[in-house]
Image (cartoon, coloured by chain):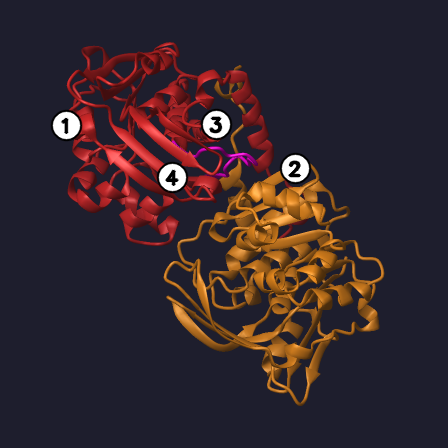
Chain colours: A red, B orange
């Protein structure tokens, strides 16, 4: 199935305790598509850049089989640029600057060839923009949606309207708590799903993720890594891996959602091992498969033995 | 196999957003033994109380088959008392008071019948006191040890000496980071295990736990609960459940350690559903078994399907 990602394509300035990059390739749509491509050969991108966006970065994506028909380039404007500096523990970061540039008037019009997209990833954007993308797609199999605290605080009504339409919300734990107004994540999940999403994924960074689907809760840890270079984009890469995996499934059911959660976590774990999206450039399906096996070892409870179930 | 717990038996004053208890039964040895008893019929307690400790609390433990020969009672002193108030999110608490009382001169002398103990739980105490308990035990199968930031900061040398002797350290994530002087928990684990413990368990509260044993890492989530009344003692109940489970195993190996981690997590999940150790009073092995099954559903990745391992 086709995967469509709408979001940002950006210049990222990144500082972590382990290094620094300036004007690196970044943006949610970049990470989502680069992460989806391992499982889908029909990955479509919708985003906008300015005249300063280099052909070299376009080529990074094009050469990895990402359909860029939906990448709008504006001759008179500058590309969206973001700068962030991570703290010592990598769990917190300060935003150094956010130059919206082209993004401030982003009003995506999908190419006709994109309207039949099946797996739709709405990267973090103004909820009205995300909704307008949904309006242009005829019959999606599943719509995944990200958001952030800014929209929760400033556009709660349009966010609530959007949540009534999406199938799967993918947010981090602090966003879930803010959206639900409640510290307990299990209670949060119930309240958020009452707003619409049948599936909710709560990302917890180094603590893994929780997925709520039907009556089930499924948990995955973060893959244990000694050497994390840069957490930027891990959440978007997770969504891309999740979406890419689903695109290869005959049917989307609880088992395929669980597999997709593992797959997304594994893709995210590779992403943080290098700066920006660099790890996604040369990664192979064989490396991904090996880490999925290791992931299984990490979480598999050995078969029941007499002692543990004796009542 | 026998389980020995050395630690505190205390009066706890507890305030959470959901209620309050004053002079409740508390203390690490209390929780460890009450949690161990479900899998072991030979649970031994070493602790000290004062003349104010009520017979009613002694009876709570005695009636649950806990051997109290090692519970010293001092006629002229008062029982150790602690008060804590939890914040709205239950992840942080303020200590209201710590009255050491009898604990300030606790120098445990084990009854002769305890010296053959096989599974030894050293609850959080001065590391020199923990070491003196080890000196009195002839041939333990495994020694589990807890500690806290106070000892990491104030008695690093005696703590390091102790760590060279214990088999399994059970601490929370902030303690692990402080002990290793490093934010990445995987790096922490390597450094801490270089100090001695072959097995390291890092407890992460609502985010579950990590276990490092041999070349393996094993993760468990926290059991998802909508209604958490009081987190007090969850870590000690975890250790007790873990120890109790191991006491019922023919052999302590990686599989039994993994099962014990699940078992300890399940016991801890029951503990937080009521105030103090109340949940451990009437809990049944059948209820524990049911939650272990639910725990397995929560973490089991469905069997591999073609898509996920295609390389």
Residue placed under numbered mark 4 in the picture: A85
CA–CA distance in space, label 2 to label 1: 51 Å
**Does A223 lie within the magenta span?**
yes
Residue placed under numbered mark 3 in the picture: A274
* Element under disc 2: strand
Q: Position of residue A76 (x, y in %)?
A: 15, 19
Residue A286, numbered circle? none
Q: Position of residue B189 (x, y in %)?
A: 62, 45
Q: Are marks 2 and 1 in contact (CB under 8 Å)?
A: no
Are both tags, 4 and 2, on one chain?
Answer: no
Q: Residues within 10 Å of mark 1 (few under 14, many from 20)?
A: few
Q: Residues within 10 Å of mark 4 (few under 14, many from 20)?
A: some
Name the front one of labels 2 and 1: 1
What secondary structure characterizes most of the magenta part? loop
User: In this image, B59 relative to A219: left or right?
Assistant: right
Q: Chain of mark 4?
A: A
Name the front one of labels 3 and 4: 4
A142 to B96, vertically: above or below: above
The quarter holding residue A57 reads top left
Q: Position of residue A259 (x, y in %)?
A: 47, 28
**Does B31 lie within the magenta span?**
no
Q: Residue at x 37, y 45 (%)?
A: A173
Q: How many numbered marks have been drawn onto this rendered protein structure?
A: 4
| Residue A281 visible in the snapshot | yes
Residue placed under numbered mark 1 in the picture: A105
Q: Earlier in the sequence, mark 1 or mark 4?
A: 4
- Region rendered in magenta: A218-232
CA–CA distance in space, label 3 to label 4: 16 Å
């Amino acid at each position: 199935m086709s995967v469509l990602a709408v979001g940002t394509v950006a210049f990222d300035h990144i500082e972590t305790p382990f290094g620094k990059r300036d004007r690196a390739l970044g943006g949610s749509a970049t990470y989502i598509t680069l992460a989806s491509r391992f499982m889908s050969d029909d990955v479509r991108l919708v985003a906008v850049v300015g005249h300063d966006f280099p052909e070299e970065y376009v080529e990074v994506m094009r050469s990895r089989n990402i359909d860029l028909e939906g990448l709008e380039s504006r001759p008179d404007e500058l590309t969206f640029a973001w700068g962030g500096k991570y703290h010592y523990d990598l769990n917190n970061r300060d935003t150094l600057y956010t130059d919206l540039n082209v993004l401030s008037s982003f009003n995506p019009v999908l190419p006709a060839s994109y309207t039949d997209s099946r797996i739709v990833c709405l990267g973090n954007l103004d909820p009205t923009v995300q909704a307008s993308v949904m309006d242009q797609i005829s019959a999606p199999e599943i719509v995944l949606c990200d958001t952030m605290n800014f929209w929760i605080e400033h556009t709660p009504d349009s966010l609530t309207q959007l949540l009534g339409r999406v199938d799967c919300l993918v947010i981090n734990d602090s966003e879930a708590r803010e959206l639900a107004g409640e510290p307990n994540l299990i209670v949060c999940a119930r309240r958020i799903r009452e707003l619409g999403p049948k599936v909710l994924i709560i990302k917890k960074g180094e603590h893994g993720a929780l997925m709520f689907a039907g009556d089930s809760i499924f948990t995955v840890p973060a893959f244990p890594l000694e050497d994390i270079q840069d957490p930027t984009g891990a959440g978007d890469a997770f969504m891309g891996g999740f979406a890419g995996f689903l695109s290869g499934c005959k049917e989307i059911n609880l088992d395929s959602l669980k597999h997709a959660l593992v797959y997304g976590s594994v893709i995210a774990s590779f992403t943080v091992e290098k700066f920006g999206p660099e790890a996604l450039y040369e990664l192979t399906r064989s490396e991904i498969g090996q880490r999925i096996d290791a992931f299984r070892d990490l979480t598999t409870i050995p078969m029941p033995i007499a002692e543990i179930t004796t009542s």
